[in-house]
Amino acid sequence: MYKNKSRAHCLDTEWIGHPKCSTCSVRSTVLFAGLDESELDGLLQPVNQFLFHARSSLYEQGEAGQFVYSIRSGVIKLTQNLANGATRVVRLMQAGDVVGLEALLGEAYHHNAVVLADADICRIQAKVIHDLDERTNHLRRQLMQRWQSHITEADEFIVQLSTGSSAARLARLLLKLRRMHEAFITLNREDIGAMLGVTTETASRLMAEFKRNGWVQEAQGRCVGCDAKQLERVALDLG
């Protein structure tokens, strides 16, 4: 169980240990891609690898940012608390993505980061990244790419999931989740509603309609397949 000075972040966290970044099997896709072994010297101790189980919390909106989290596997949803008490899912992050980058600016976290599918994650102190940034330009380039990736993902959420009919938005979401593989089988109706900006009841009604039409298949309450061609037609919102 990982604890900070004041409280437990997650009761289900399993600490795996200090990763060996130079031999990481997914290093080409994570934050330290492009750094050679000499640039990784001394990095081992400040980085910790954790297994976070589904529904675990990495951090909460407004919490002081101390770490960034590099996702080796799994899916993370980023949510924001709204003034009316509702919560909106604003982004989904998967293997190769980095969350909590605002910690590098000395800011509090802008979102709640919650695990959707069991995640293998490296937690990195912001200071470690600042120190590496002073030693190499490769990391700076990687960070710029991560920022751009976040902007692109946010734009996609706005365009794809906030415009058009509810049915079209759901079809676009299901197609997106299908491409993410792991996330396709883990979203519940509340998550779907929070992503589309509709009530849980509306999300349930739409999913029931999609199932009746054979556009999506579920087993034990989880998505296991879909008719991609039909969903693509619905996603066009042609009426």
Image (cartoon, rainbow, N blue to C red):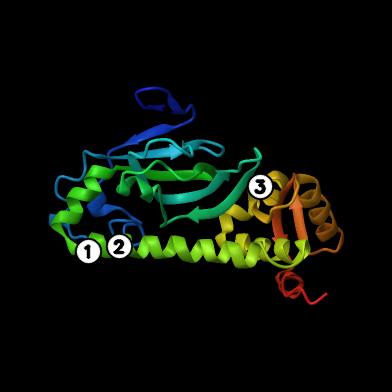
Which secondary structure, mark 1?
A: helix
Q: What residue type is labelled 2?
A: Gln
Report the label total.
Answer: 3
**Quadrant for the C terminus in the image:** bottom right
Give, as a three-letter code, the residue at label 3.
Asp
Q: Residue furthest top?
A: 6
Residue 74 in picture, x, y percent from top left: 49, 49
Image quarter of residue 169: bottom right
Q: Distance between the residues labelled 1 and 2?
A: 6 Å
Contact between marks 1 and 2 (CB within 8 A): the answer is yes
Label 3: element kind: helix
In the image: residue 225, left or right of residue 201 = left
Q: Mark 1 points at which residue?
A: 138
Residue 39 rendering spot, x and y as whole percentages: 15, 55
What's under tag 1, amino acid-wise? His
How far separated are the C-alphas under marks 3 and 1? 36 Å
Residue holding disc 3: 191
The secondary structure type at the circle numbered 2 is helix
The residue wearing badge 2 is: 142
> Closer to the N terminus: mark 3 or mark 2?
2
